[in-house]
Image (spheres, rainbow, N blue to C red):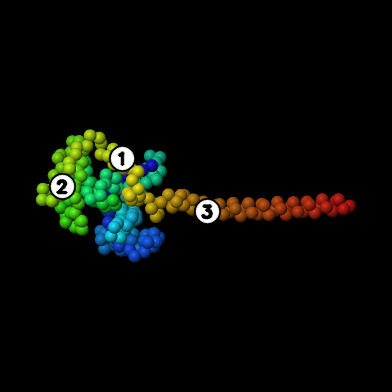
């Protein structure tokens, strides 16, 4: 089960780390990003991605309360997700090009395999200009998709980037679902939200009971062996008589 969550609710950023040990990276990342985030790192969940060509590690940051709410809603619907992915990371990606999706209520931008942002429609032009200005490498092309019924995309003419504009004839979810197999998207179900950890939380309260059961079984086995030996000895004595 692959679940897409709103990209506007997830901060996609990056950090340089000397180590390649995933455990050490997971422990260090929250404190390396602390100054860049408005939220308390203790209340945030950090999911690690891959390193880019410059060696920076991609990181997805989302509020823990929001993660808990999503998983609770899915559990109520009887769904156990294998992947929880920011929707903008399933926009079609092409090397050297940025992808933009204008949908009802907002705009999704994917600027790299594991980078991008969700933008409200009113600020799309400003945020696009700012992101281009802050980007180290300007894209060769902007690939723009516009959902049916959404006003024509307003792309500033002074960007100096070739733009291709296409109207979607299917719901935006269909465009994103077509990329659901892509391995480069960051799965938010890591660390305390990984499947093994979630199963561990279910199993943990039963550990004392299981331990007591194991002790009882060992005692039962010991008593059975003891009685069998007593019977063997009695049988040997009777045969001798």
Looking at the image, do the residues carrying marks 3 and 1 touch, with CB atoms under 8 Å apart?
A: no
Q: Residue at label 2?
A: 162
Between label 3 and label 2, give the one nearer the viewer.
2
* 10 Å crowding of disc 2: few (<14), some (14-19), many (20+): few
In this view, the residue farthest toward the bottom is 18
**SS label for mark 3:** helix
Q: Position of residue 103 (x, y in %)?
A: 21, 41
Is 138 on the left-hand or right-hand side of 78?
Answer: left
Is 234 on the left-hand or right-hand side of 50?
Answer: right
In this view, the residue in front, 140 or 37, is: 140
* 10 Å crowding of disc 3: few (<14), some (14-19), many (20+): few
Q: Position of residue 87 (x, y in %)?
A: 29, 45
Q: Residue at label 1?
A: 178
Q: Position of residue 38 (x, y in %)?
A: 25, 58
In this view, the residue in front, 235 or 11, is: 11
Between label 1 and label 2, give the one nearer the viewer.
2
Tell me the quadrant of the picture where the N terminus can be found: top left
Q: Residue at x 36, y 64 (%)?
A: 19
Q: Residue at label 3?
A: 207
């Amino acid at each position: 089960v692959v679940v897409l969550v709103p990209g506007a609710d997830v901060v996609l950023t990056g950090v340089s780390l000397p180590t390649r040990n995933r455990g050490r990276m997971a422990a260090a990342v929250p404190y390396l990003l602390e100054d860049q985030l408005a939220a308390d790192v203790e209340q945030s969940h950090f999911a690690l991605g891959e390193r880019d060509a410059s060696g920076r590690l991609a990181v997805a940051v989302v509020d823990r309360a929001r993660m808990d709410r999503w998983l609770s809603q899915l559990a109520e619907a009887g769904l156990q997700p294998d992947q929880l992915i920011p929707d903008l990371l399933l926009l079609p990606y092409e090397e050297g090009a940025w992808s933009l999706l204008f949908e009802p209520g907002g705009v999704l931008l994917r600027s790299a395999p594991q980078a991008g942002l969700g933008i409200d429609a009113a600020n799309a032009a400003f945020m696009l200009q700012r992101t281009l200005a802050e980007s180290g490498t300007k894209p060769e092309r902007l690939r723009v998709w516009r959902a049916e019924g959404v006003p024509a995309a307003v792309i500033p003419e002074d960007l100096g980037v070739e733009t291709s504009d296409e109207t979607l004839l299917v719901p935006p979810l269909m465009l994103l679902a077509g990329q659901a197999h892509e391995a480069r998207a960051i799965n938010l179900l890591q660390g305390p939200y990984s499947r093994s950890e979630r199963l561990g939380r279910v199993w943990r309260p039963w550990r004392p009971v299981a331990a007591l059961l194991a002790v009882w079984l060992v005692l039962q086995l010991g008593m059975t062996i003891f009685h069998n030996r007593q019977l063997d000895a009695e049988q040997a004595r009777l045969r001798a008589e």
